[in-house]
Amino acid sequence: DADHRTALGAYQFSALNQAISGDVAICYARGGVEVALPLSIVQLSSGAVKSDDDNAGLAASHPNLLFWLEENAKLNLMQQYAGSGEYFSNAVTRIQLKEGAQLTHAYVQEQSIEAVHVDSVFVSCGENSSYTAQVVQVGGRISRVNLKVMLEGRFAATAVKGLTLGTGGQLGDLHSAIAHLSPDCSSQQEHYNAVSGRARVVFRGAVQVPLGSDNSTAHQLCRSLLLENTAKVDVSPTLEIFTDEVECTHGATIADLDDEMVFYLQSRGLDRMQARSLLLEGWALDTMSQVPSKRSKRRVATKASRLAPEAAARPANLQSFSSI
């Protein structure tokens, strides 16, 4: 069997990271320690400097991070990626939560529009531990985040909320897999996408409940806004259940912005593009409750609002109106 740290279809990238990385950044919280302020980890990258007589290759970095929380420790973490130019970022993030530990994890990817970003996040949850994550992807020409959460101890719980924005020719990809490896565990996944231009967003979410993991609760939902006919969304929520006494649901929706909401704002004096921009901005802000940085929230919301001009020419679907 493949090493779980390199699963989710990203074996080669994770193996490359572990082969090249000379150092590992480690954050260790002792038992019972509660960190009051959010811990911010920022990874900045830049493209290679090219001259007329120099054929510089693609700049690459391979961050390797480990977060270890002992029993009943609590931490708020903000992990952020940004940069300028053309480069390749290939990260591995490992998280170990011991009994009763609690981690709130805000993951914000704002890479350069020329960058390629890959990150594999592996989380191990002990008994009564809690992992709450917010995964935001707005940058990068190609971006993929692989999230694997293993609920290894009884009564472990996780809640994952994702937001991916795509415009131009971007490709944004999120693969998640949550494994209920003990009885009485719970998981909640909510993923939101907004796509315009020729962009493509992919979400593949798996919930695995093996034999013996009774009384598991797992809910998974993906909502996507397809703002232009040339944009693409690929959604595949899946359940793999091999035991009884479980409560598991999954679902997905794909639609444009509600024309009735757009019409309401137009009736208050906004034009169609302004109305769509305002709706997208508010929608993005509403999905980022776990992100502690107001500046990051504002940048992401601004990008969401800018998806509207590309799709402004899309005509209203008058048949969808229920009140006129």
Image: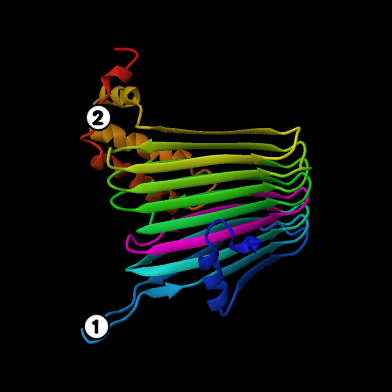
- Looking at the picture, how far across and down is residue 134, in whole percent? 54, 48
- Looking at the picture, how far across and down is residue 198, in whole percent? 28, 47
Q: In which quarter of the image is residue 116?
A: bottom left
Q: Mark 2 or mark 1: which is in front?
A: 1
- Quarter of the picture holding the C terminus: top left
192 in magenta:
no
Left or right, 130 with respect to 252, comes to right
What amino acid is labelled 1 in the image?
Ser
For mark 1, does the 10 Å Cα neighbourhood hold few (<14), some (14 to 19), or many (20 or more) residues?
few
111 in magenta:
yes
Residues at marks 2 and 1 touching, judged by CB atoms closer than 8 Å: no
- Looking at the picture, how far across and down is residue 46, in whole percent? 37, 72
Tag count: 2
> Residue at position x 57%, y 54% from top?
147
> Residue at position x 74%, y 38% from top?
243
76 up-or-down from 12: above or below: above
For mark 2, does the 10 Å Cα neighbourhood hold few (<14), some (14 to 19), or many (20 or more) residues?
some
Mark drawn on residue 270 = 2
Disc with the residue nearer the chain's start (2 vs 1): 1
How far separated are the C-alphas under marks 2 and 1?
A: 49 Å
Residue at the outermost front position: 1
Q: Give the range drawn in magenta.
A: 102-131
Mark drawn on residue 51 = 1
Left or right, 88 with respect to 185, comes to left
As helix, strand or loop, the secondary structure at mark 1 comes to loop
What amino acid is labelled 2 in the image?
Leu
